[in-house]
Image: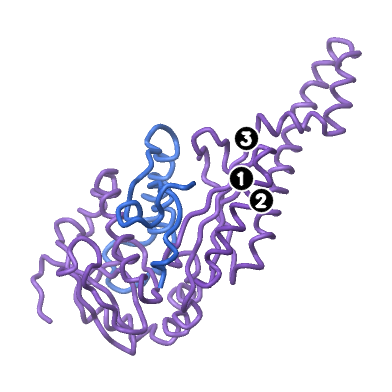
């Protein structure tokens, strides 16, 4: 298909069967399919003045633009995901022509088809846990090393007490980290049996859920759609179990399986 | 596929960026902007967003069509 030079092809996702585009995103008319190698790519023409290399870099500095465009990206993939298993692509995956998109589908057809089979009838669910360290700190004082240091501080000489206090701070910090790690592990272990795969990402620095404390777990689970209700119920049950201990658990989904496309990713990097 | 399972919470912009900028499949070829560039931008945005009051909840794709509605 001919296209004006000032346009680019934006790829959202790939499916195994041709998806219905009606009702997907804000401008379903702008979406179209590029079919090749038994795969169906959901694409859209975008303006080079918005998504061309230098302009895209400038736009990415604009938080308002990023918020609108990433939301749009997600909305379109979620629309397709309602009825189809999808391989979600990264934001701003762009080609010069339909033909170069076709070439990529041909080149990676095998791994994409295998991945679509593996992901079929499953979705990603996000689970984040936060820890109210002040609340946990009250428990940490019960930690034996810390409490014996507390006692020692009371009877020590000023110089010794200074060193002991420093040691106490360090022990308390280590005890905190251990405790946070322990909770994170418990949560992942409890949810693993209801999921097909689990991935943990690094926790986001300084990411605090309003009033819930610091993030201690940032995980994604691939869950069979038939088990989704059980999975959500299990996260709620964990939340209730640990609420009294200063742990807050947040579950979101269903998401496109962004975290579970590594086989395709690996093939691509090779 | 998922319509009967309409669950969950507001989505923050960071949570969205964590997925659409950091994860998801990338293809090489004539992709106009390099992955390394997006990575740099992503890290910057994430820090900016997770720092202060920009952590507003996004009533994104989700809230509007009833999916990922507010958590109970």
Would residue B67 be seen by someone viewing this image from the given angle? yes
Q: Nearer the viewer, mark 3 or mark 1?
A: 3
Q: Which chain is purple?
A: A
Task: Name the chain letter of the residue that bears numbered label 1.
Answer: A
User: In the image, is residue A159 above or below residue A22?
Assistant: above
Same chain shared by disc 3 and disc 1: yes
Q: Residue furthest top?
A: A158
- Cα–Cα gap, marks 3 and 1: 10 Å
Q: Position of residue A45 (x, y in %)?
A: 17, 68
Answer left or right for A134 relative to A174: left
- Cα–Cα gap, marks 1 and 2: 7 Å
User: Between disc 3 and disc 2, whose residue precedes?
Assistant: 3
User: Between disc 3 and disc 1, whose residue precedes?
Assistant: 3
Give the camera-side residue of A3 and A22.
A22
Split into 4 quadrants, where in the image is the N terminus of chain A?
A: bottom left
Q: Which chain is blue?
A: B
Same chain shared by disc 3 and disc 2: yes
Residue A132: give its label. 3
Q: Position of residue A211 (x, y in %)?
A: 53, 33
- Identify the residue under disc 2: A184
Contact? badges 1 and 2 (CB < 8 Å): yes
Name the residue: 86% across, 25% down: A149
Answer left or right for A155 relative to B28: right
- Identify the residue under disc 1: A216
Q: Residue furthest bottom?
A: A37
């Amino acid at each position: 298909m001919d296209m004006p030079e000032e346009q680019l092809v934006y790829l959202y996702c790939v499916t195994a069967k041709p998806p219905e585009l009606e009702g997907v995103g804000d401008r379903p008319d702008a979406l179209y399919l590029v079919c090749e190698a038994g795969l169906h790519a959901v694409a859209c023409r975008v303006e080079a003045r918005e998504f061309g290399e230098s302009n895209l870099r400038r736009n990415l500095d604009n938080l308002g633009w990023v918020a609108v465009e990433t939301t749009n990206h997600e909305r379109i993939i979620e629309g397709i995901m309602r009825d189809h298993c999808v391989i979600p692509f990264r934001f701003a995956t762009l080609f010069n022509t339909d033909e170069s998109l076709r070439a990529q589908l041909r080149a990676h057809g095998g791994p994409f088809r295998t991945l679509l089979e593996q992901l079929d009838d499953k979705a990603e669910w996000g689970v984040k846990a936060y820890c109210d360290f002040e609340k946990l700190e009250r428990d940490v004082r019960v930690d034996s090393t810390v409490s014996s240091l507390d006692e020692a501080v009371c009877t020590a000489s000023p110089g010794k007490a200074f060193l002991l206090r420093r040691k106490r701070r360090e022990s308390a910090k280590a005890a905190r980290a251990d405790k946070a790690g322990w909770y994170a592990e418990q949560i992942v272990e409890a949810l693993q049996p209801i999921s097909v795969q689990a991935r943990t990402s690094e926790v986001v620095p300084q990411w605090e859920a309003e009033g819930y404390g610091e993030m201690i777990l940032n995980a994604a689970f691939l869950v069979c759609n038939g088990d989704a209700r059980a999975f959500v119920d299990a996260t709620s049950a964990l939340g209730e179990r640990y609420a009294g201990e200063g742990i807050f658990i947040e579950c979101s989904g269903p998401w496109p399986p962004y975290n579970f496309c590594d086989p395709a990713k690996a093939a691509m990097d090779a | 596929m998922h319509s009967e399972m309409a669950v969950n919470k507001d989505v923050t912009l960071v949570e969205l960026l964590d997925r659409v900028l950091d994860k998801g499949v990338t293809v090489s070829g004539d992709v106009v902007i390099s992955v390394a560039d997006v990575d740099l931008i992503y890290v910057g945005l994430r820090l900016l967003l997770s720092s202060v009051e920009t952590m507003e909840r996004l009533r994104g794709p989700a809230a509007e069509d009833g999916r990922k509605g507010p958590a109970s």
